[in-house]
Amino acid sequence: MPELVFSGITLVVVLILISVFFTFFPLGLWISAIAAGVKVSIFTLVGMRLRRVIPSRVINPMIKAHKAGLDVSINQLESHYLAGGNVDRVINALIAAHRANIVSLTFERCAAIDLAGRDVLQAVQMSVNPKVIETPYIAGVAINGIEVKAKARITVRANIERLVGGAGEETVIARVGEGIVSTIGSSESHTVVLENPDRISKTILDKGLDAGTAFEILSIDILDVDIGQNIGANL
């Protein structure tokens, strides 16, 4: 009976040691990396464990980057992980940019965008496929006292170079709204706006409203124009 207990304890200890060994020496991940052509030593993976880095969060994106032909290093990916970044999302964004021939997006810039809290992958996709933003109805009063309500559609493309520190969609909508109110307010009559609604979009585009934002405004189209109250008569 004591021999059985001793054998059971020995088996448990051996299993624990094996578990600890494979935790600090991720052989499966190392073999996958070597098979994919990524040169990494087993001691590098052990060092990641000691630095509290999950090796798979670095090695798997590194394999993906190597297969896509990107020039990134394990140290770059590990540094970004330690800084709190999303390594997998950064690599996916770089691959998308590489496929779209966006040469201005380097790893450093991509990592900075990610650490700034922006979705860098979505930004790359938006730079290739522009996004459409619709404003709510925005009211302005013409000089003759008639209220005019206009609704606009804004087509924007992400500006990679201004993603860090650039203003977001809310600022673009607010600036377009201000331009609508200003254009309507400078019109002699509400009929001028109704007859030529594209005058609003032309005036707004000439103001360069995308300055300081993370977007480039491609077009502004007036979807609908409606008549509101006679503000002058009410006053």
Image (cartoon, rainbow, N blue to C red):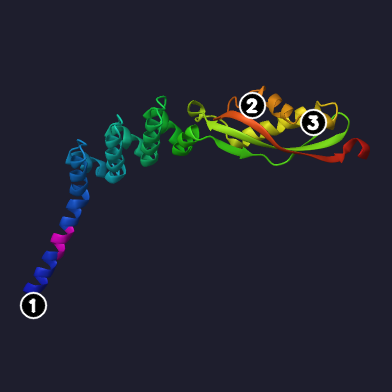
Question: Residue type at mark 1?
Answer: Met
Cβ–Cβ below 8 Å for labels 2 and 1?
Answer: no
- Above or below, 208 against 91 in this view is above
Mark pair 3, 1: CA separation:
100 Å
Residue 26 pos. (x, y %): 20, 48
Look at mark 2 in the image and give the residue it sits on.
Answer: 209
Return the residue at label 1: 1
Q: Which residues are magenta?
A: 12-16
Q: Quadrant of residue 57?
A: top left
Q: Is residue 171 visible?
A: no
Given the image, on which type of amino acid does mark 3 rest? Glu
Label 3 CA crowd tier, 10 Å (few <14, some 14–19, many 20+):
few
Left-right relation of 77 to 104 = left
The reply to whether discs 3 and 1 touch (Cβ–Cβ < 8 Å) is no
Residue 195's disc number:
3
Depth check, front residue: 141 or 119: 141
Q: Position of residue 178 (x, y in %)?
A: 72, 31
Question: Which of label 3 and label 1 is nearer to you?
Answer: 3
Alpha-carbon span between mark 2 and mark 1? 84 Å
Name the secondary structure under disc 1.
loop
* Earlier residue among tags 3 and 2: 3
Mark closest to the chain's N terminus, 3 or 1: 1
Q: Name the residue furthest left.
A: 3
Q: Residues within 10 Å of mark 1 (few under 14, many from 20)?
A: few
Q: Nearer the viewer, residue 224 or 72?
A: 224
Mark nearest the camera among 2 and 1 is 2
Please report whichever mark, 2 or 1, sits nearer to the chain's N-terminal start: 1
Q: Secondary structure at mark 3?
A: helix
Residue 45 appears at what percent x and percent y? 22, 42
